[in-house]
Amino acid sequence: MSTSSLARGALIVFEGCDRSGKSTQCLMLVERLKALGKRVQHLRFPDRSTPTGQKINAYLANASEMQDDKIHQLFSENRWEAVPSMLEALKNGTTLVVDRYAFSGVAFSSAKGLDLEWCKKPDAGLPAPDAVIYLDIPIEAAMKRGDFGNERYETRAFQEKVAAQYKKLQTPSWMMMDARLPIDQLQADIFNIASKVIADAQNAPVGKLW
Ligand code: DGP
């Protein structure tokens, strides 16, 4: 079979405030798809393993400072670095389950007061997700989960601003999930959504943001 006739993989993005359960749900979805023999890869942004990711990591840990517009661009660069391998994987039939994407970039940076439309510009042209799964949680509930408060953005006031900015980005196509549901119940719903998204994406071209 030639590569061009191979059904492509789907680009499935998880978004939400800190401690909404994205990482857990991404991992569970990846494991379930793998167990079914599907080609699937787990990505997360920022990718802290690359040189840009290491600078971002230092910034998030409050070990370095950077101007808001500069760090915004660095987060975007960190995503662009992954694009060639993402496109290759999708073309080869691998579904990408992505923990945070450009929507985090816009929501977090515009929550600091940067113009929302300006914030969208560096990520314009990135591969468009076939689905955005948003894990919705009241900030109060997120704060009660472990580890909240260790990194730069993890304050109640800031996360509330982020949630408000996410709302501005939300479109009718976003899958809004109640992140307070029991983990397995939430995963069952997410798996059903992902299965349909994977089937629908097979023969569709990869779109571009925004
Ligand atoms: P995580 O590894 O998912 O915990 O994300 C790290 C933190 O960085 C989290 O508070 C969300 C934030 N973040 C993720 N992507 C971006 C981005 O593109 N821009 C900004 N300003 N913050 C981001």
Image: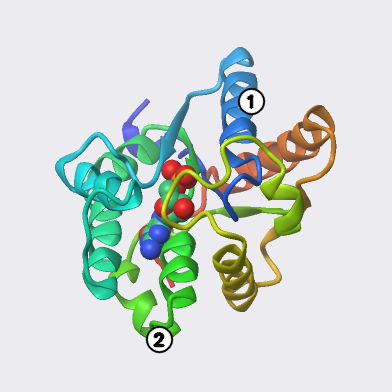
Element on which disc 1 rests: helix
113 up-or-down from 122: above or below: below
At horizontal 66% and vertical 40% (from top left) the residue drawn is 194
- The verdict on label 1 being within 8 Å of ligand 1 is no
Expressed as whole percent of the image width and height from the top left, the position of residue 83 reads 28, 49
Q: Can residue 205 be seen here?
A: no
The numbered dot on residue 28 is 1
| Residue situated in front as seen by the camera: 21 or 202 | 21
Label 1 sits on what residue type?
Met
- The residue wearing badge 2 is 115
Label 2 sits on what residue type?
Asp
Expressed as whole percent of the image width and height from the top left, the position of residue 204 reads 51, 53
Disc 1: CA contacts within 10 A as few (<14), some (14-19) or many (>=20): some
- Taking the image as shown, residue 9 lies to the left or right of residue 171, namely left
At horizontal 57% and vertical 74% (from top left) the residue drawn is 165
Q: Quadrant of ligand 1?
A: bottom left
Counting the numbered discs, the total is 2
| Residue situated in front as seen by the camera: 176 or 57 | 57
Disc 2: CA contacts within 10 A as few (<14), some (14-19) or many (>=20): few
